[in-house]
Image (cartoon, grey):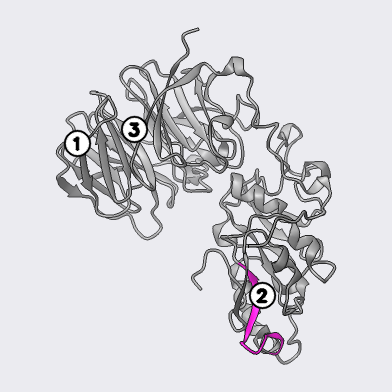
Amino acid sequence: MPTDNTTNNKTTRRNLFRKGGLAAGAAVVTGTAATLAAKGRSDGTVWQIDPEKCIQCGNCATYCVLDPSAVTCVHALKLCGYCDLCFAYFSPGFEPEAGIEAPAVESQLCPTEAIKRRWIEGPHYEYTIDEELCIGCGKCIKGCNNFGNGSLFLQVMHDRCVNCNECSIAEACPSDAFQRVPANHPYLLKGEDH
Amino acid sequence: MAQWKPSGLGPEFTYDLSELKKVDPALIHYEQAASVPTGMMKPKAIAVGADRRLFVAGDGGVRVFDPAGKPVLQFETGGEPHCIALGKTGTVYVGMKDHVEVYDASGKRAAAWKGLGERAYVTSLAVGEADVFVADAGNRVLLRYDTSGKLLKRIGEEDAAKHAPGLVVPSPYFDVALGPEGMLWLVNPGRRRVECYTYDGAFRFAWGKFSMKVEGFCGCCNPTHLAIDADGNFITSEKGLPRVKVHDDEGNFKSVVAAPADFADGTVGLDLAVDAKGRILVLDPKRRAVRIFVKKRS
């Protein structure tokens, strides 16, 4: 993904994962390395969530010193099944008698309607996260882990995180999922080796 | 590790499947009669022979148990097995990620078939009189071989000229089974149904529908596994709502073998087999055991 460092070196939450997937994550690392180095502690580290340890307790949404939280959901499109009936998108009790093209709000799992979908072809849909709406509650991730491939996960977004020495989410994390990672490699993305 | 602190989020942020996991007890016609510990960390697949010997694949090999559950044979495979099926002469076919390995009844490797490429992800095998069917979830295709490993047919691929839409396989669960008269059945998981094909790859018919309710197949892609008993009844397992059910030979829901309450949270990969006595064998990877279900007497 091209990054125009000459005109806008700041990666916004809106464009950070606009296209979803892992390529976007890689661009973030490139585009914000200098900023992160400045934010990082003297040991050159920043906070990040280990997706394999995260249990989606909801604390990321409410314990961050920022409002909305610096944590948001990320989608690894490489792992996604592009299903027509995605139960990270639909609420578990959804029955598609009335079709699936324009589901009612109450049929959607996300309380803030942060998951968007668009038809690709056949029974395949692409799902993306609206970072402006996502509060990092992790509810969709539970749906994805339970019924799907686990392609959704939470990450600390480093265009927002102020990298507190004592991260209040990390203190409230019941699964030790918060950890320090190198500032020049600040994301722990699913479906990639790090 | 931090003490548990409540998030303070409202009830609309709670993810709750408890109501969907409930099953009317009157629909559960089976009960567990026995359990065979596999002794494996990651058991992946099971098969049962005509002599009711149980074959379990996982942890880089195969373990064989007699009908009483006593281990009688163990052998290593050339990697991590994904699936297993038995030929009538005692031949053991083991599906690895991208190829099939063949072993004789003593566990000696007889052949390793040609690899299926980088994208391959073999998930299931079915063995007939002269054919071996290999389900490749990665390439979304069912492959028909002869018993020597010669590829005869590719089944289920998209073909615009024949108005064939192709199989929808969103996750690494794609099962194949042969019915009592050799009918070829495979799961089309993304369409939540079971489909019948001729050996030449012609689609015949299908059954199954999406529903979180017990008579349907739940979630984005189910059933994950399929077995067929001697009367042609279909036994299926699902993920998301882990449950094992029986449908009759026309696909009509009959009963529940094991309900979500019978499995630990997050259980997935419930491989199935039916033995010569009609008992339903369910691989429970969380318990690392093969659980054997029989019809309730009442």
- In the image, residue B224 above or below residue A117: above
Q: Is residue A42 magenta?
A: yes
Residue B223 seen: yes
Residue type at the position of mark 3: Tyr
Look at the numbered disc 2 and give the secondary structure of its residue: strand
Say which residue label 3 marks: B199
Residue B40: where, in percent of width, then height? 34, 45
Which mark's residue is nearer the viewer, 1 or 3?
1
Look at the numbered disc 3 and give the secondary structure of its residue: loop
Q: Is residue A68 left or right of residue B293?
A: right
Residue B194: where, in percent of width, then height? 49, 31
Which mark's residue is nearer the viewer, 3 or 2?
2
Residue appearing at x 40%, y 19% in the figure? B232
Residue appearing at x 50%, y 40% in the figure? B164
Residue B59: where, in percent of width, then height? 33, 49
Q: Quadrant of the N terminus of chain A?
A: bottom right
Instruction: Farthest residue to the top: give it.
Output: B298
Look at the numbered disc 1 and give the secondary structure of its residue: loop
Q: CA distance from mark 1 to mark 3?
A: 21 Å
Instruction: Farthest residue to the bottom: give it.
Output: A6
Q: Which residues are magenta?
A: A38-49
Looking at the picture, tell me which residue is in the foreground, B143 or A26. Answer: A26
**In the image, which disc is placed on residue A47?**
2
